[in-house]
Image (cartoon, rainbow, N blue to C red):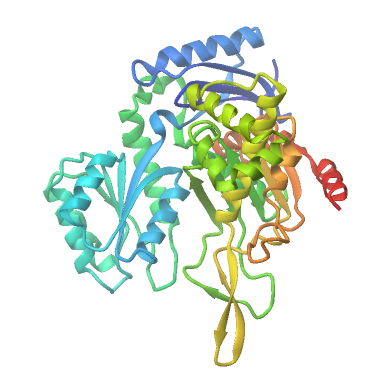
Amino acid sequence: MTGRAALLIDFGSTFTKLRAVDLDSARVLGSGQGPSTVTTDVTIGLDAALGDLEARLGALPAFTHRLASSSAAGGLRMVTVGLVKELTAEAARQAALGAGAKLVGTFAYRLTAADLESIAELAPDMILLAGGTDGGNAEVILHNADALAWTALGCPIVVAGNREAADEALSLLEAGGTSARKADNVMPAFGELAIEPARAAIRQIFIERIVHAKGIDKAADRFDAVLMPTPAAVMEGARLLSEGTESRAGLGPLLVVDIGGATTDVHSVAEGAPSQDGVLVQGLPEPKVKRTVEGDLGMRHNAAAIVEAVGPAALAAEAGLAAEAVEAQLAQVAGDVERLPQSAQDLAFDAALAHGAVRVAVARHAGTTRVMQTVNGPVLVQSGKDLSDVATVIGTGGPLAHGGTPADVLRAALADPGEPMSLRPKRPALYVDADYLLYAAGLLAEVDPDAGFALASASLRPVEDEVDHERRSHG
């Protein structure tokens, strides 16, 4: 083999998955996988995956880069603590999600004994402690730092609150034997988000501490670095495609929907400002690069929740199945969450589940408008991001890459005339990440962005023609 090659590793909860890619031609040389053995010895699964890859390639190339991400053991479990739920607690939540965390709890105001018990039960890998604008309230973050310092949680804490109280909060935590690190305030002024420094601190601790806790550092000599949690790698891949590189123009504002067995993640890279004149924006400003995680919209672990969110009748109609058949399909999934679709009825049910997950997840991610009466008459008020003019929607994950009806599924992300207040994309180009390479592009973004961009671009399969046909057939 000639040219530069990279080995891209994803330590997942079930499988360790590998991609060998040619950086010069932006193509996948081969794939391999083995069981994820992070609870015993991570190198066993990695060796199995490498053996599988070598068997497919005949011989392994000399890799220029060996980069890894990890979603093993449930991902990076995080709890955020802020001052006010709608303000600093929400800013902390955005920082945690943007760092690729699995947010398991959000707390606001002064932590109570019951709150501390709840946090202990959640068993987080890390806590993000925020609270107060710079020069604002200091009492609450100091109270919470002192309360957390004397727990037996044993997890690191990132302090990203009022800068005038941050050093004292850090001292309180360290006095109790808690590992802590300071980052810039996630909300330095009222209504101002600054979440990138906290994201960077979270990812750094992930590399230093969480990788060790998951046992992945046992294989450290096999790769260059674990750069980030897998969801963060997907987000960085989306950012790279949107913004491009110094030598390649990006695709512009875009939306990525990642459908999984336990969650459906939505990533947007867009300013989200109102697309209409005269619209007032309410609430915290939205981050340009935003991730939301819908933990109740997993294709396997939460299939019943998708049916409930969409409505059994609507899902049955989408699948072309009778109500009794939907119930039988749900029972099959509940009995074996690892089961893959076997029959035409299984495939139709899975496609309807994916359609429902996308519809609900994107509606939750996108902003909304409402009419508010004022002394000067009615005005339109926007909450969240306006994604109406987003030009590109990308679907990734097994149900889209391997499903037979990706256009039908991605159609659910589009604006619906029946829901005029939802600010979903109106007429974007639709693509499927056919080779599941967004995470790989995210890993390459820092070391070889041109190769990462080319790789992700090559993986995009357009489905616009199918969508246009659907639009015409539905009038």
Residue 265 at x, y = what percent? Answer: 54, 44
Residue 159 visible in the snapshot: yes
Residue in view at x 40 percent, y 20 percent: 219
Query: In terms of depth relative to the viewer, which is nearer, 219 or 151?
Result: 151
* In this picture, residue 54 sits left or right of residue 425: left
Residue in view at x 59 percent, y 46 percent: 311
Residue 52 at x, y = what percent? Answer: 57, 10
Residue in view at x 40 percent, y 54 percent: 93
Residue 168 visible in the snapshot: no
Say which quadrant the N terminus sits in. Answer: top right
Query: In terms of depth relative to the viewer, which is nearer, 360 or 251?
Result: 360
Residue 454 at x, y = what percent? Answer: 70, 37
Query: In terms of depth relative to the viewer, which is nearer, 18 or 325?
Result: 325
Q: Which quadrant would residue 444 be assigned to in this image?
A: top right
In the rendered view, tell whether residue 254 sits above or below residue 86.
above
Query: In terms of depth relative to the viewer, which is nearer, 339 or 140?
Result: 339
Residue in view at x 29 percent, y 65 percent: 163
Residue 279 at x, y = what percent? Answer: 62, 77
